[in-house]
Amino acid sequence: MARLDRPPRRLRLGLRCLAVAASIGTLGAIGAASFAAAAARAAPQPPQEQQAPGYTDTPLLPDGKWCVHDSRRPQPRVVTPGSASTPAQPGRAPSDAIVLFDGKDLAKWTSGGGEARWKVGDGYVEVNGTGDIETRESFGDCQLHVEWCAPLPASGDSQGRGNSGIYFMQRYEVQVLDCFQNATYPDGQAAALYGQKPPLVNACRAPGEWQSYDIVFEAPRFDGAKLVKPARVTVLHNGVVVHHGQELLGATAHRELARYEAHADRLPIRLQDHGNPVRYRNLWLRPLGEYDRP
Ligand code: MG
């Protein structure tokens, strides 16, 4: 026979997560003492098929906001994935991406305060000695997809062969370089965090072949002039992980130790004109948001 001096088992379990929620203020004025009574008066649960899937009677996660399998947690936003590129054809960007270059024009880019003047060809843009270009829009934390192609035939050696680069926030470079059978200093080769970290492996394709970078960049955080969290980068080169959550030492420097100087939360992405006719195509970016913000 069931004990009458205790609430049903289901209700007792329900107190676990809800009681903690009350203690952190999410139930406002309902005090701990009156909570059991309030729970007992709670409106009947809607039929099972109308409830959001999940639970409210499970342990609170360490973030203090949500329970394990919490049915009240916001559903992640739906994104239609893109498609992969082939050597002949660039892929399609995810549905929520900002397309920075779609093979047609440089409308999203600027150079020296004016129009970006790199040569736009059939589905690609080519470095042509008119200087670095950078996005008109500014970005912080983001996922960036880039495809690039080193000149064929290859010419020059070391840093002089197919050199370009992707600078996050105008200052943190992921190196672009033709490193297919081209020796250079390790922290300056393709996909290196220039002057700081070589890639874990050299995943370069031959010059004339399209290559991809998929980069997750976390911007540094500053409190006034003080660095409170360094930038962090994950890079896949042609689908191969070459950096995994690697912290940056500071802004990219040549023959000097990198260091941080405080800057804005969002800044443009810059592509380097190093005097070599490197090509780019299919550039897109997704600003990274926070969890539970659909
Ligand atoms: Mg470079």
Image (cartoon, rainbow, N blue to C red):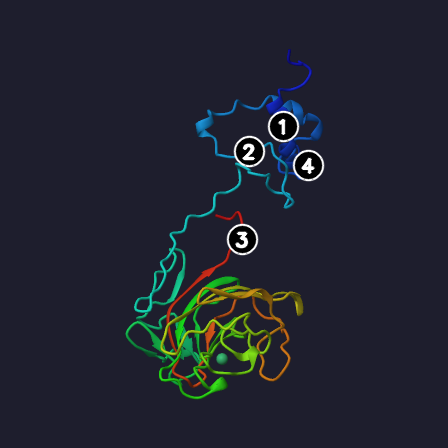
Q: Residues within 10 Å of mark 2 (few under 14, many from 20)?
A: some
Identify the residue shown where x is 61% and y is 42%: 65
**From mark 1 to mark 2, how far is it between C-alphas?**
10 Å
Amino acid type, callout 3 = Glu
Q: Which residue is under mark 4?
A: 23
Using the image, determine if residue 264 lies above or below residue 254.
above
Using the image, determine if residue 75 lies above or below residue 2.
below
**From mark 2 to mark 4, how far is it between C-alphas?**
19 Å
| Residue 188 percent across, percent down from the top left | 54, 79
Identify the residue shown where x is 59% and y is 70%: 263
**From mark 3 to mark 1, how far is it between C-alphas?**
30 Å
| Residue 234 percent across, percent down from the top left | 53, 64
**From mark 4 to mark 1, how far is it between C-alphas?**
16 Å
Q: Which residue is under mark 2?
A: 55
Query: Quick one: which residue is furthest to the top in this view?
Result: 1
- Looking at the rendered structure, the secondary structure element under dot 1 is helix
Looking at the image, is mark 2 or mark 4 nearer the viewer? Answer: 2
Report the front residue among 288 and 23.
288
Q: Residues within 10 Å of mark 4 (few under 14, many from 20)?
A: few
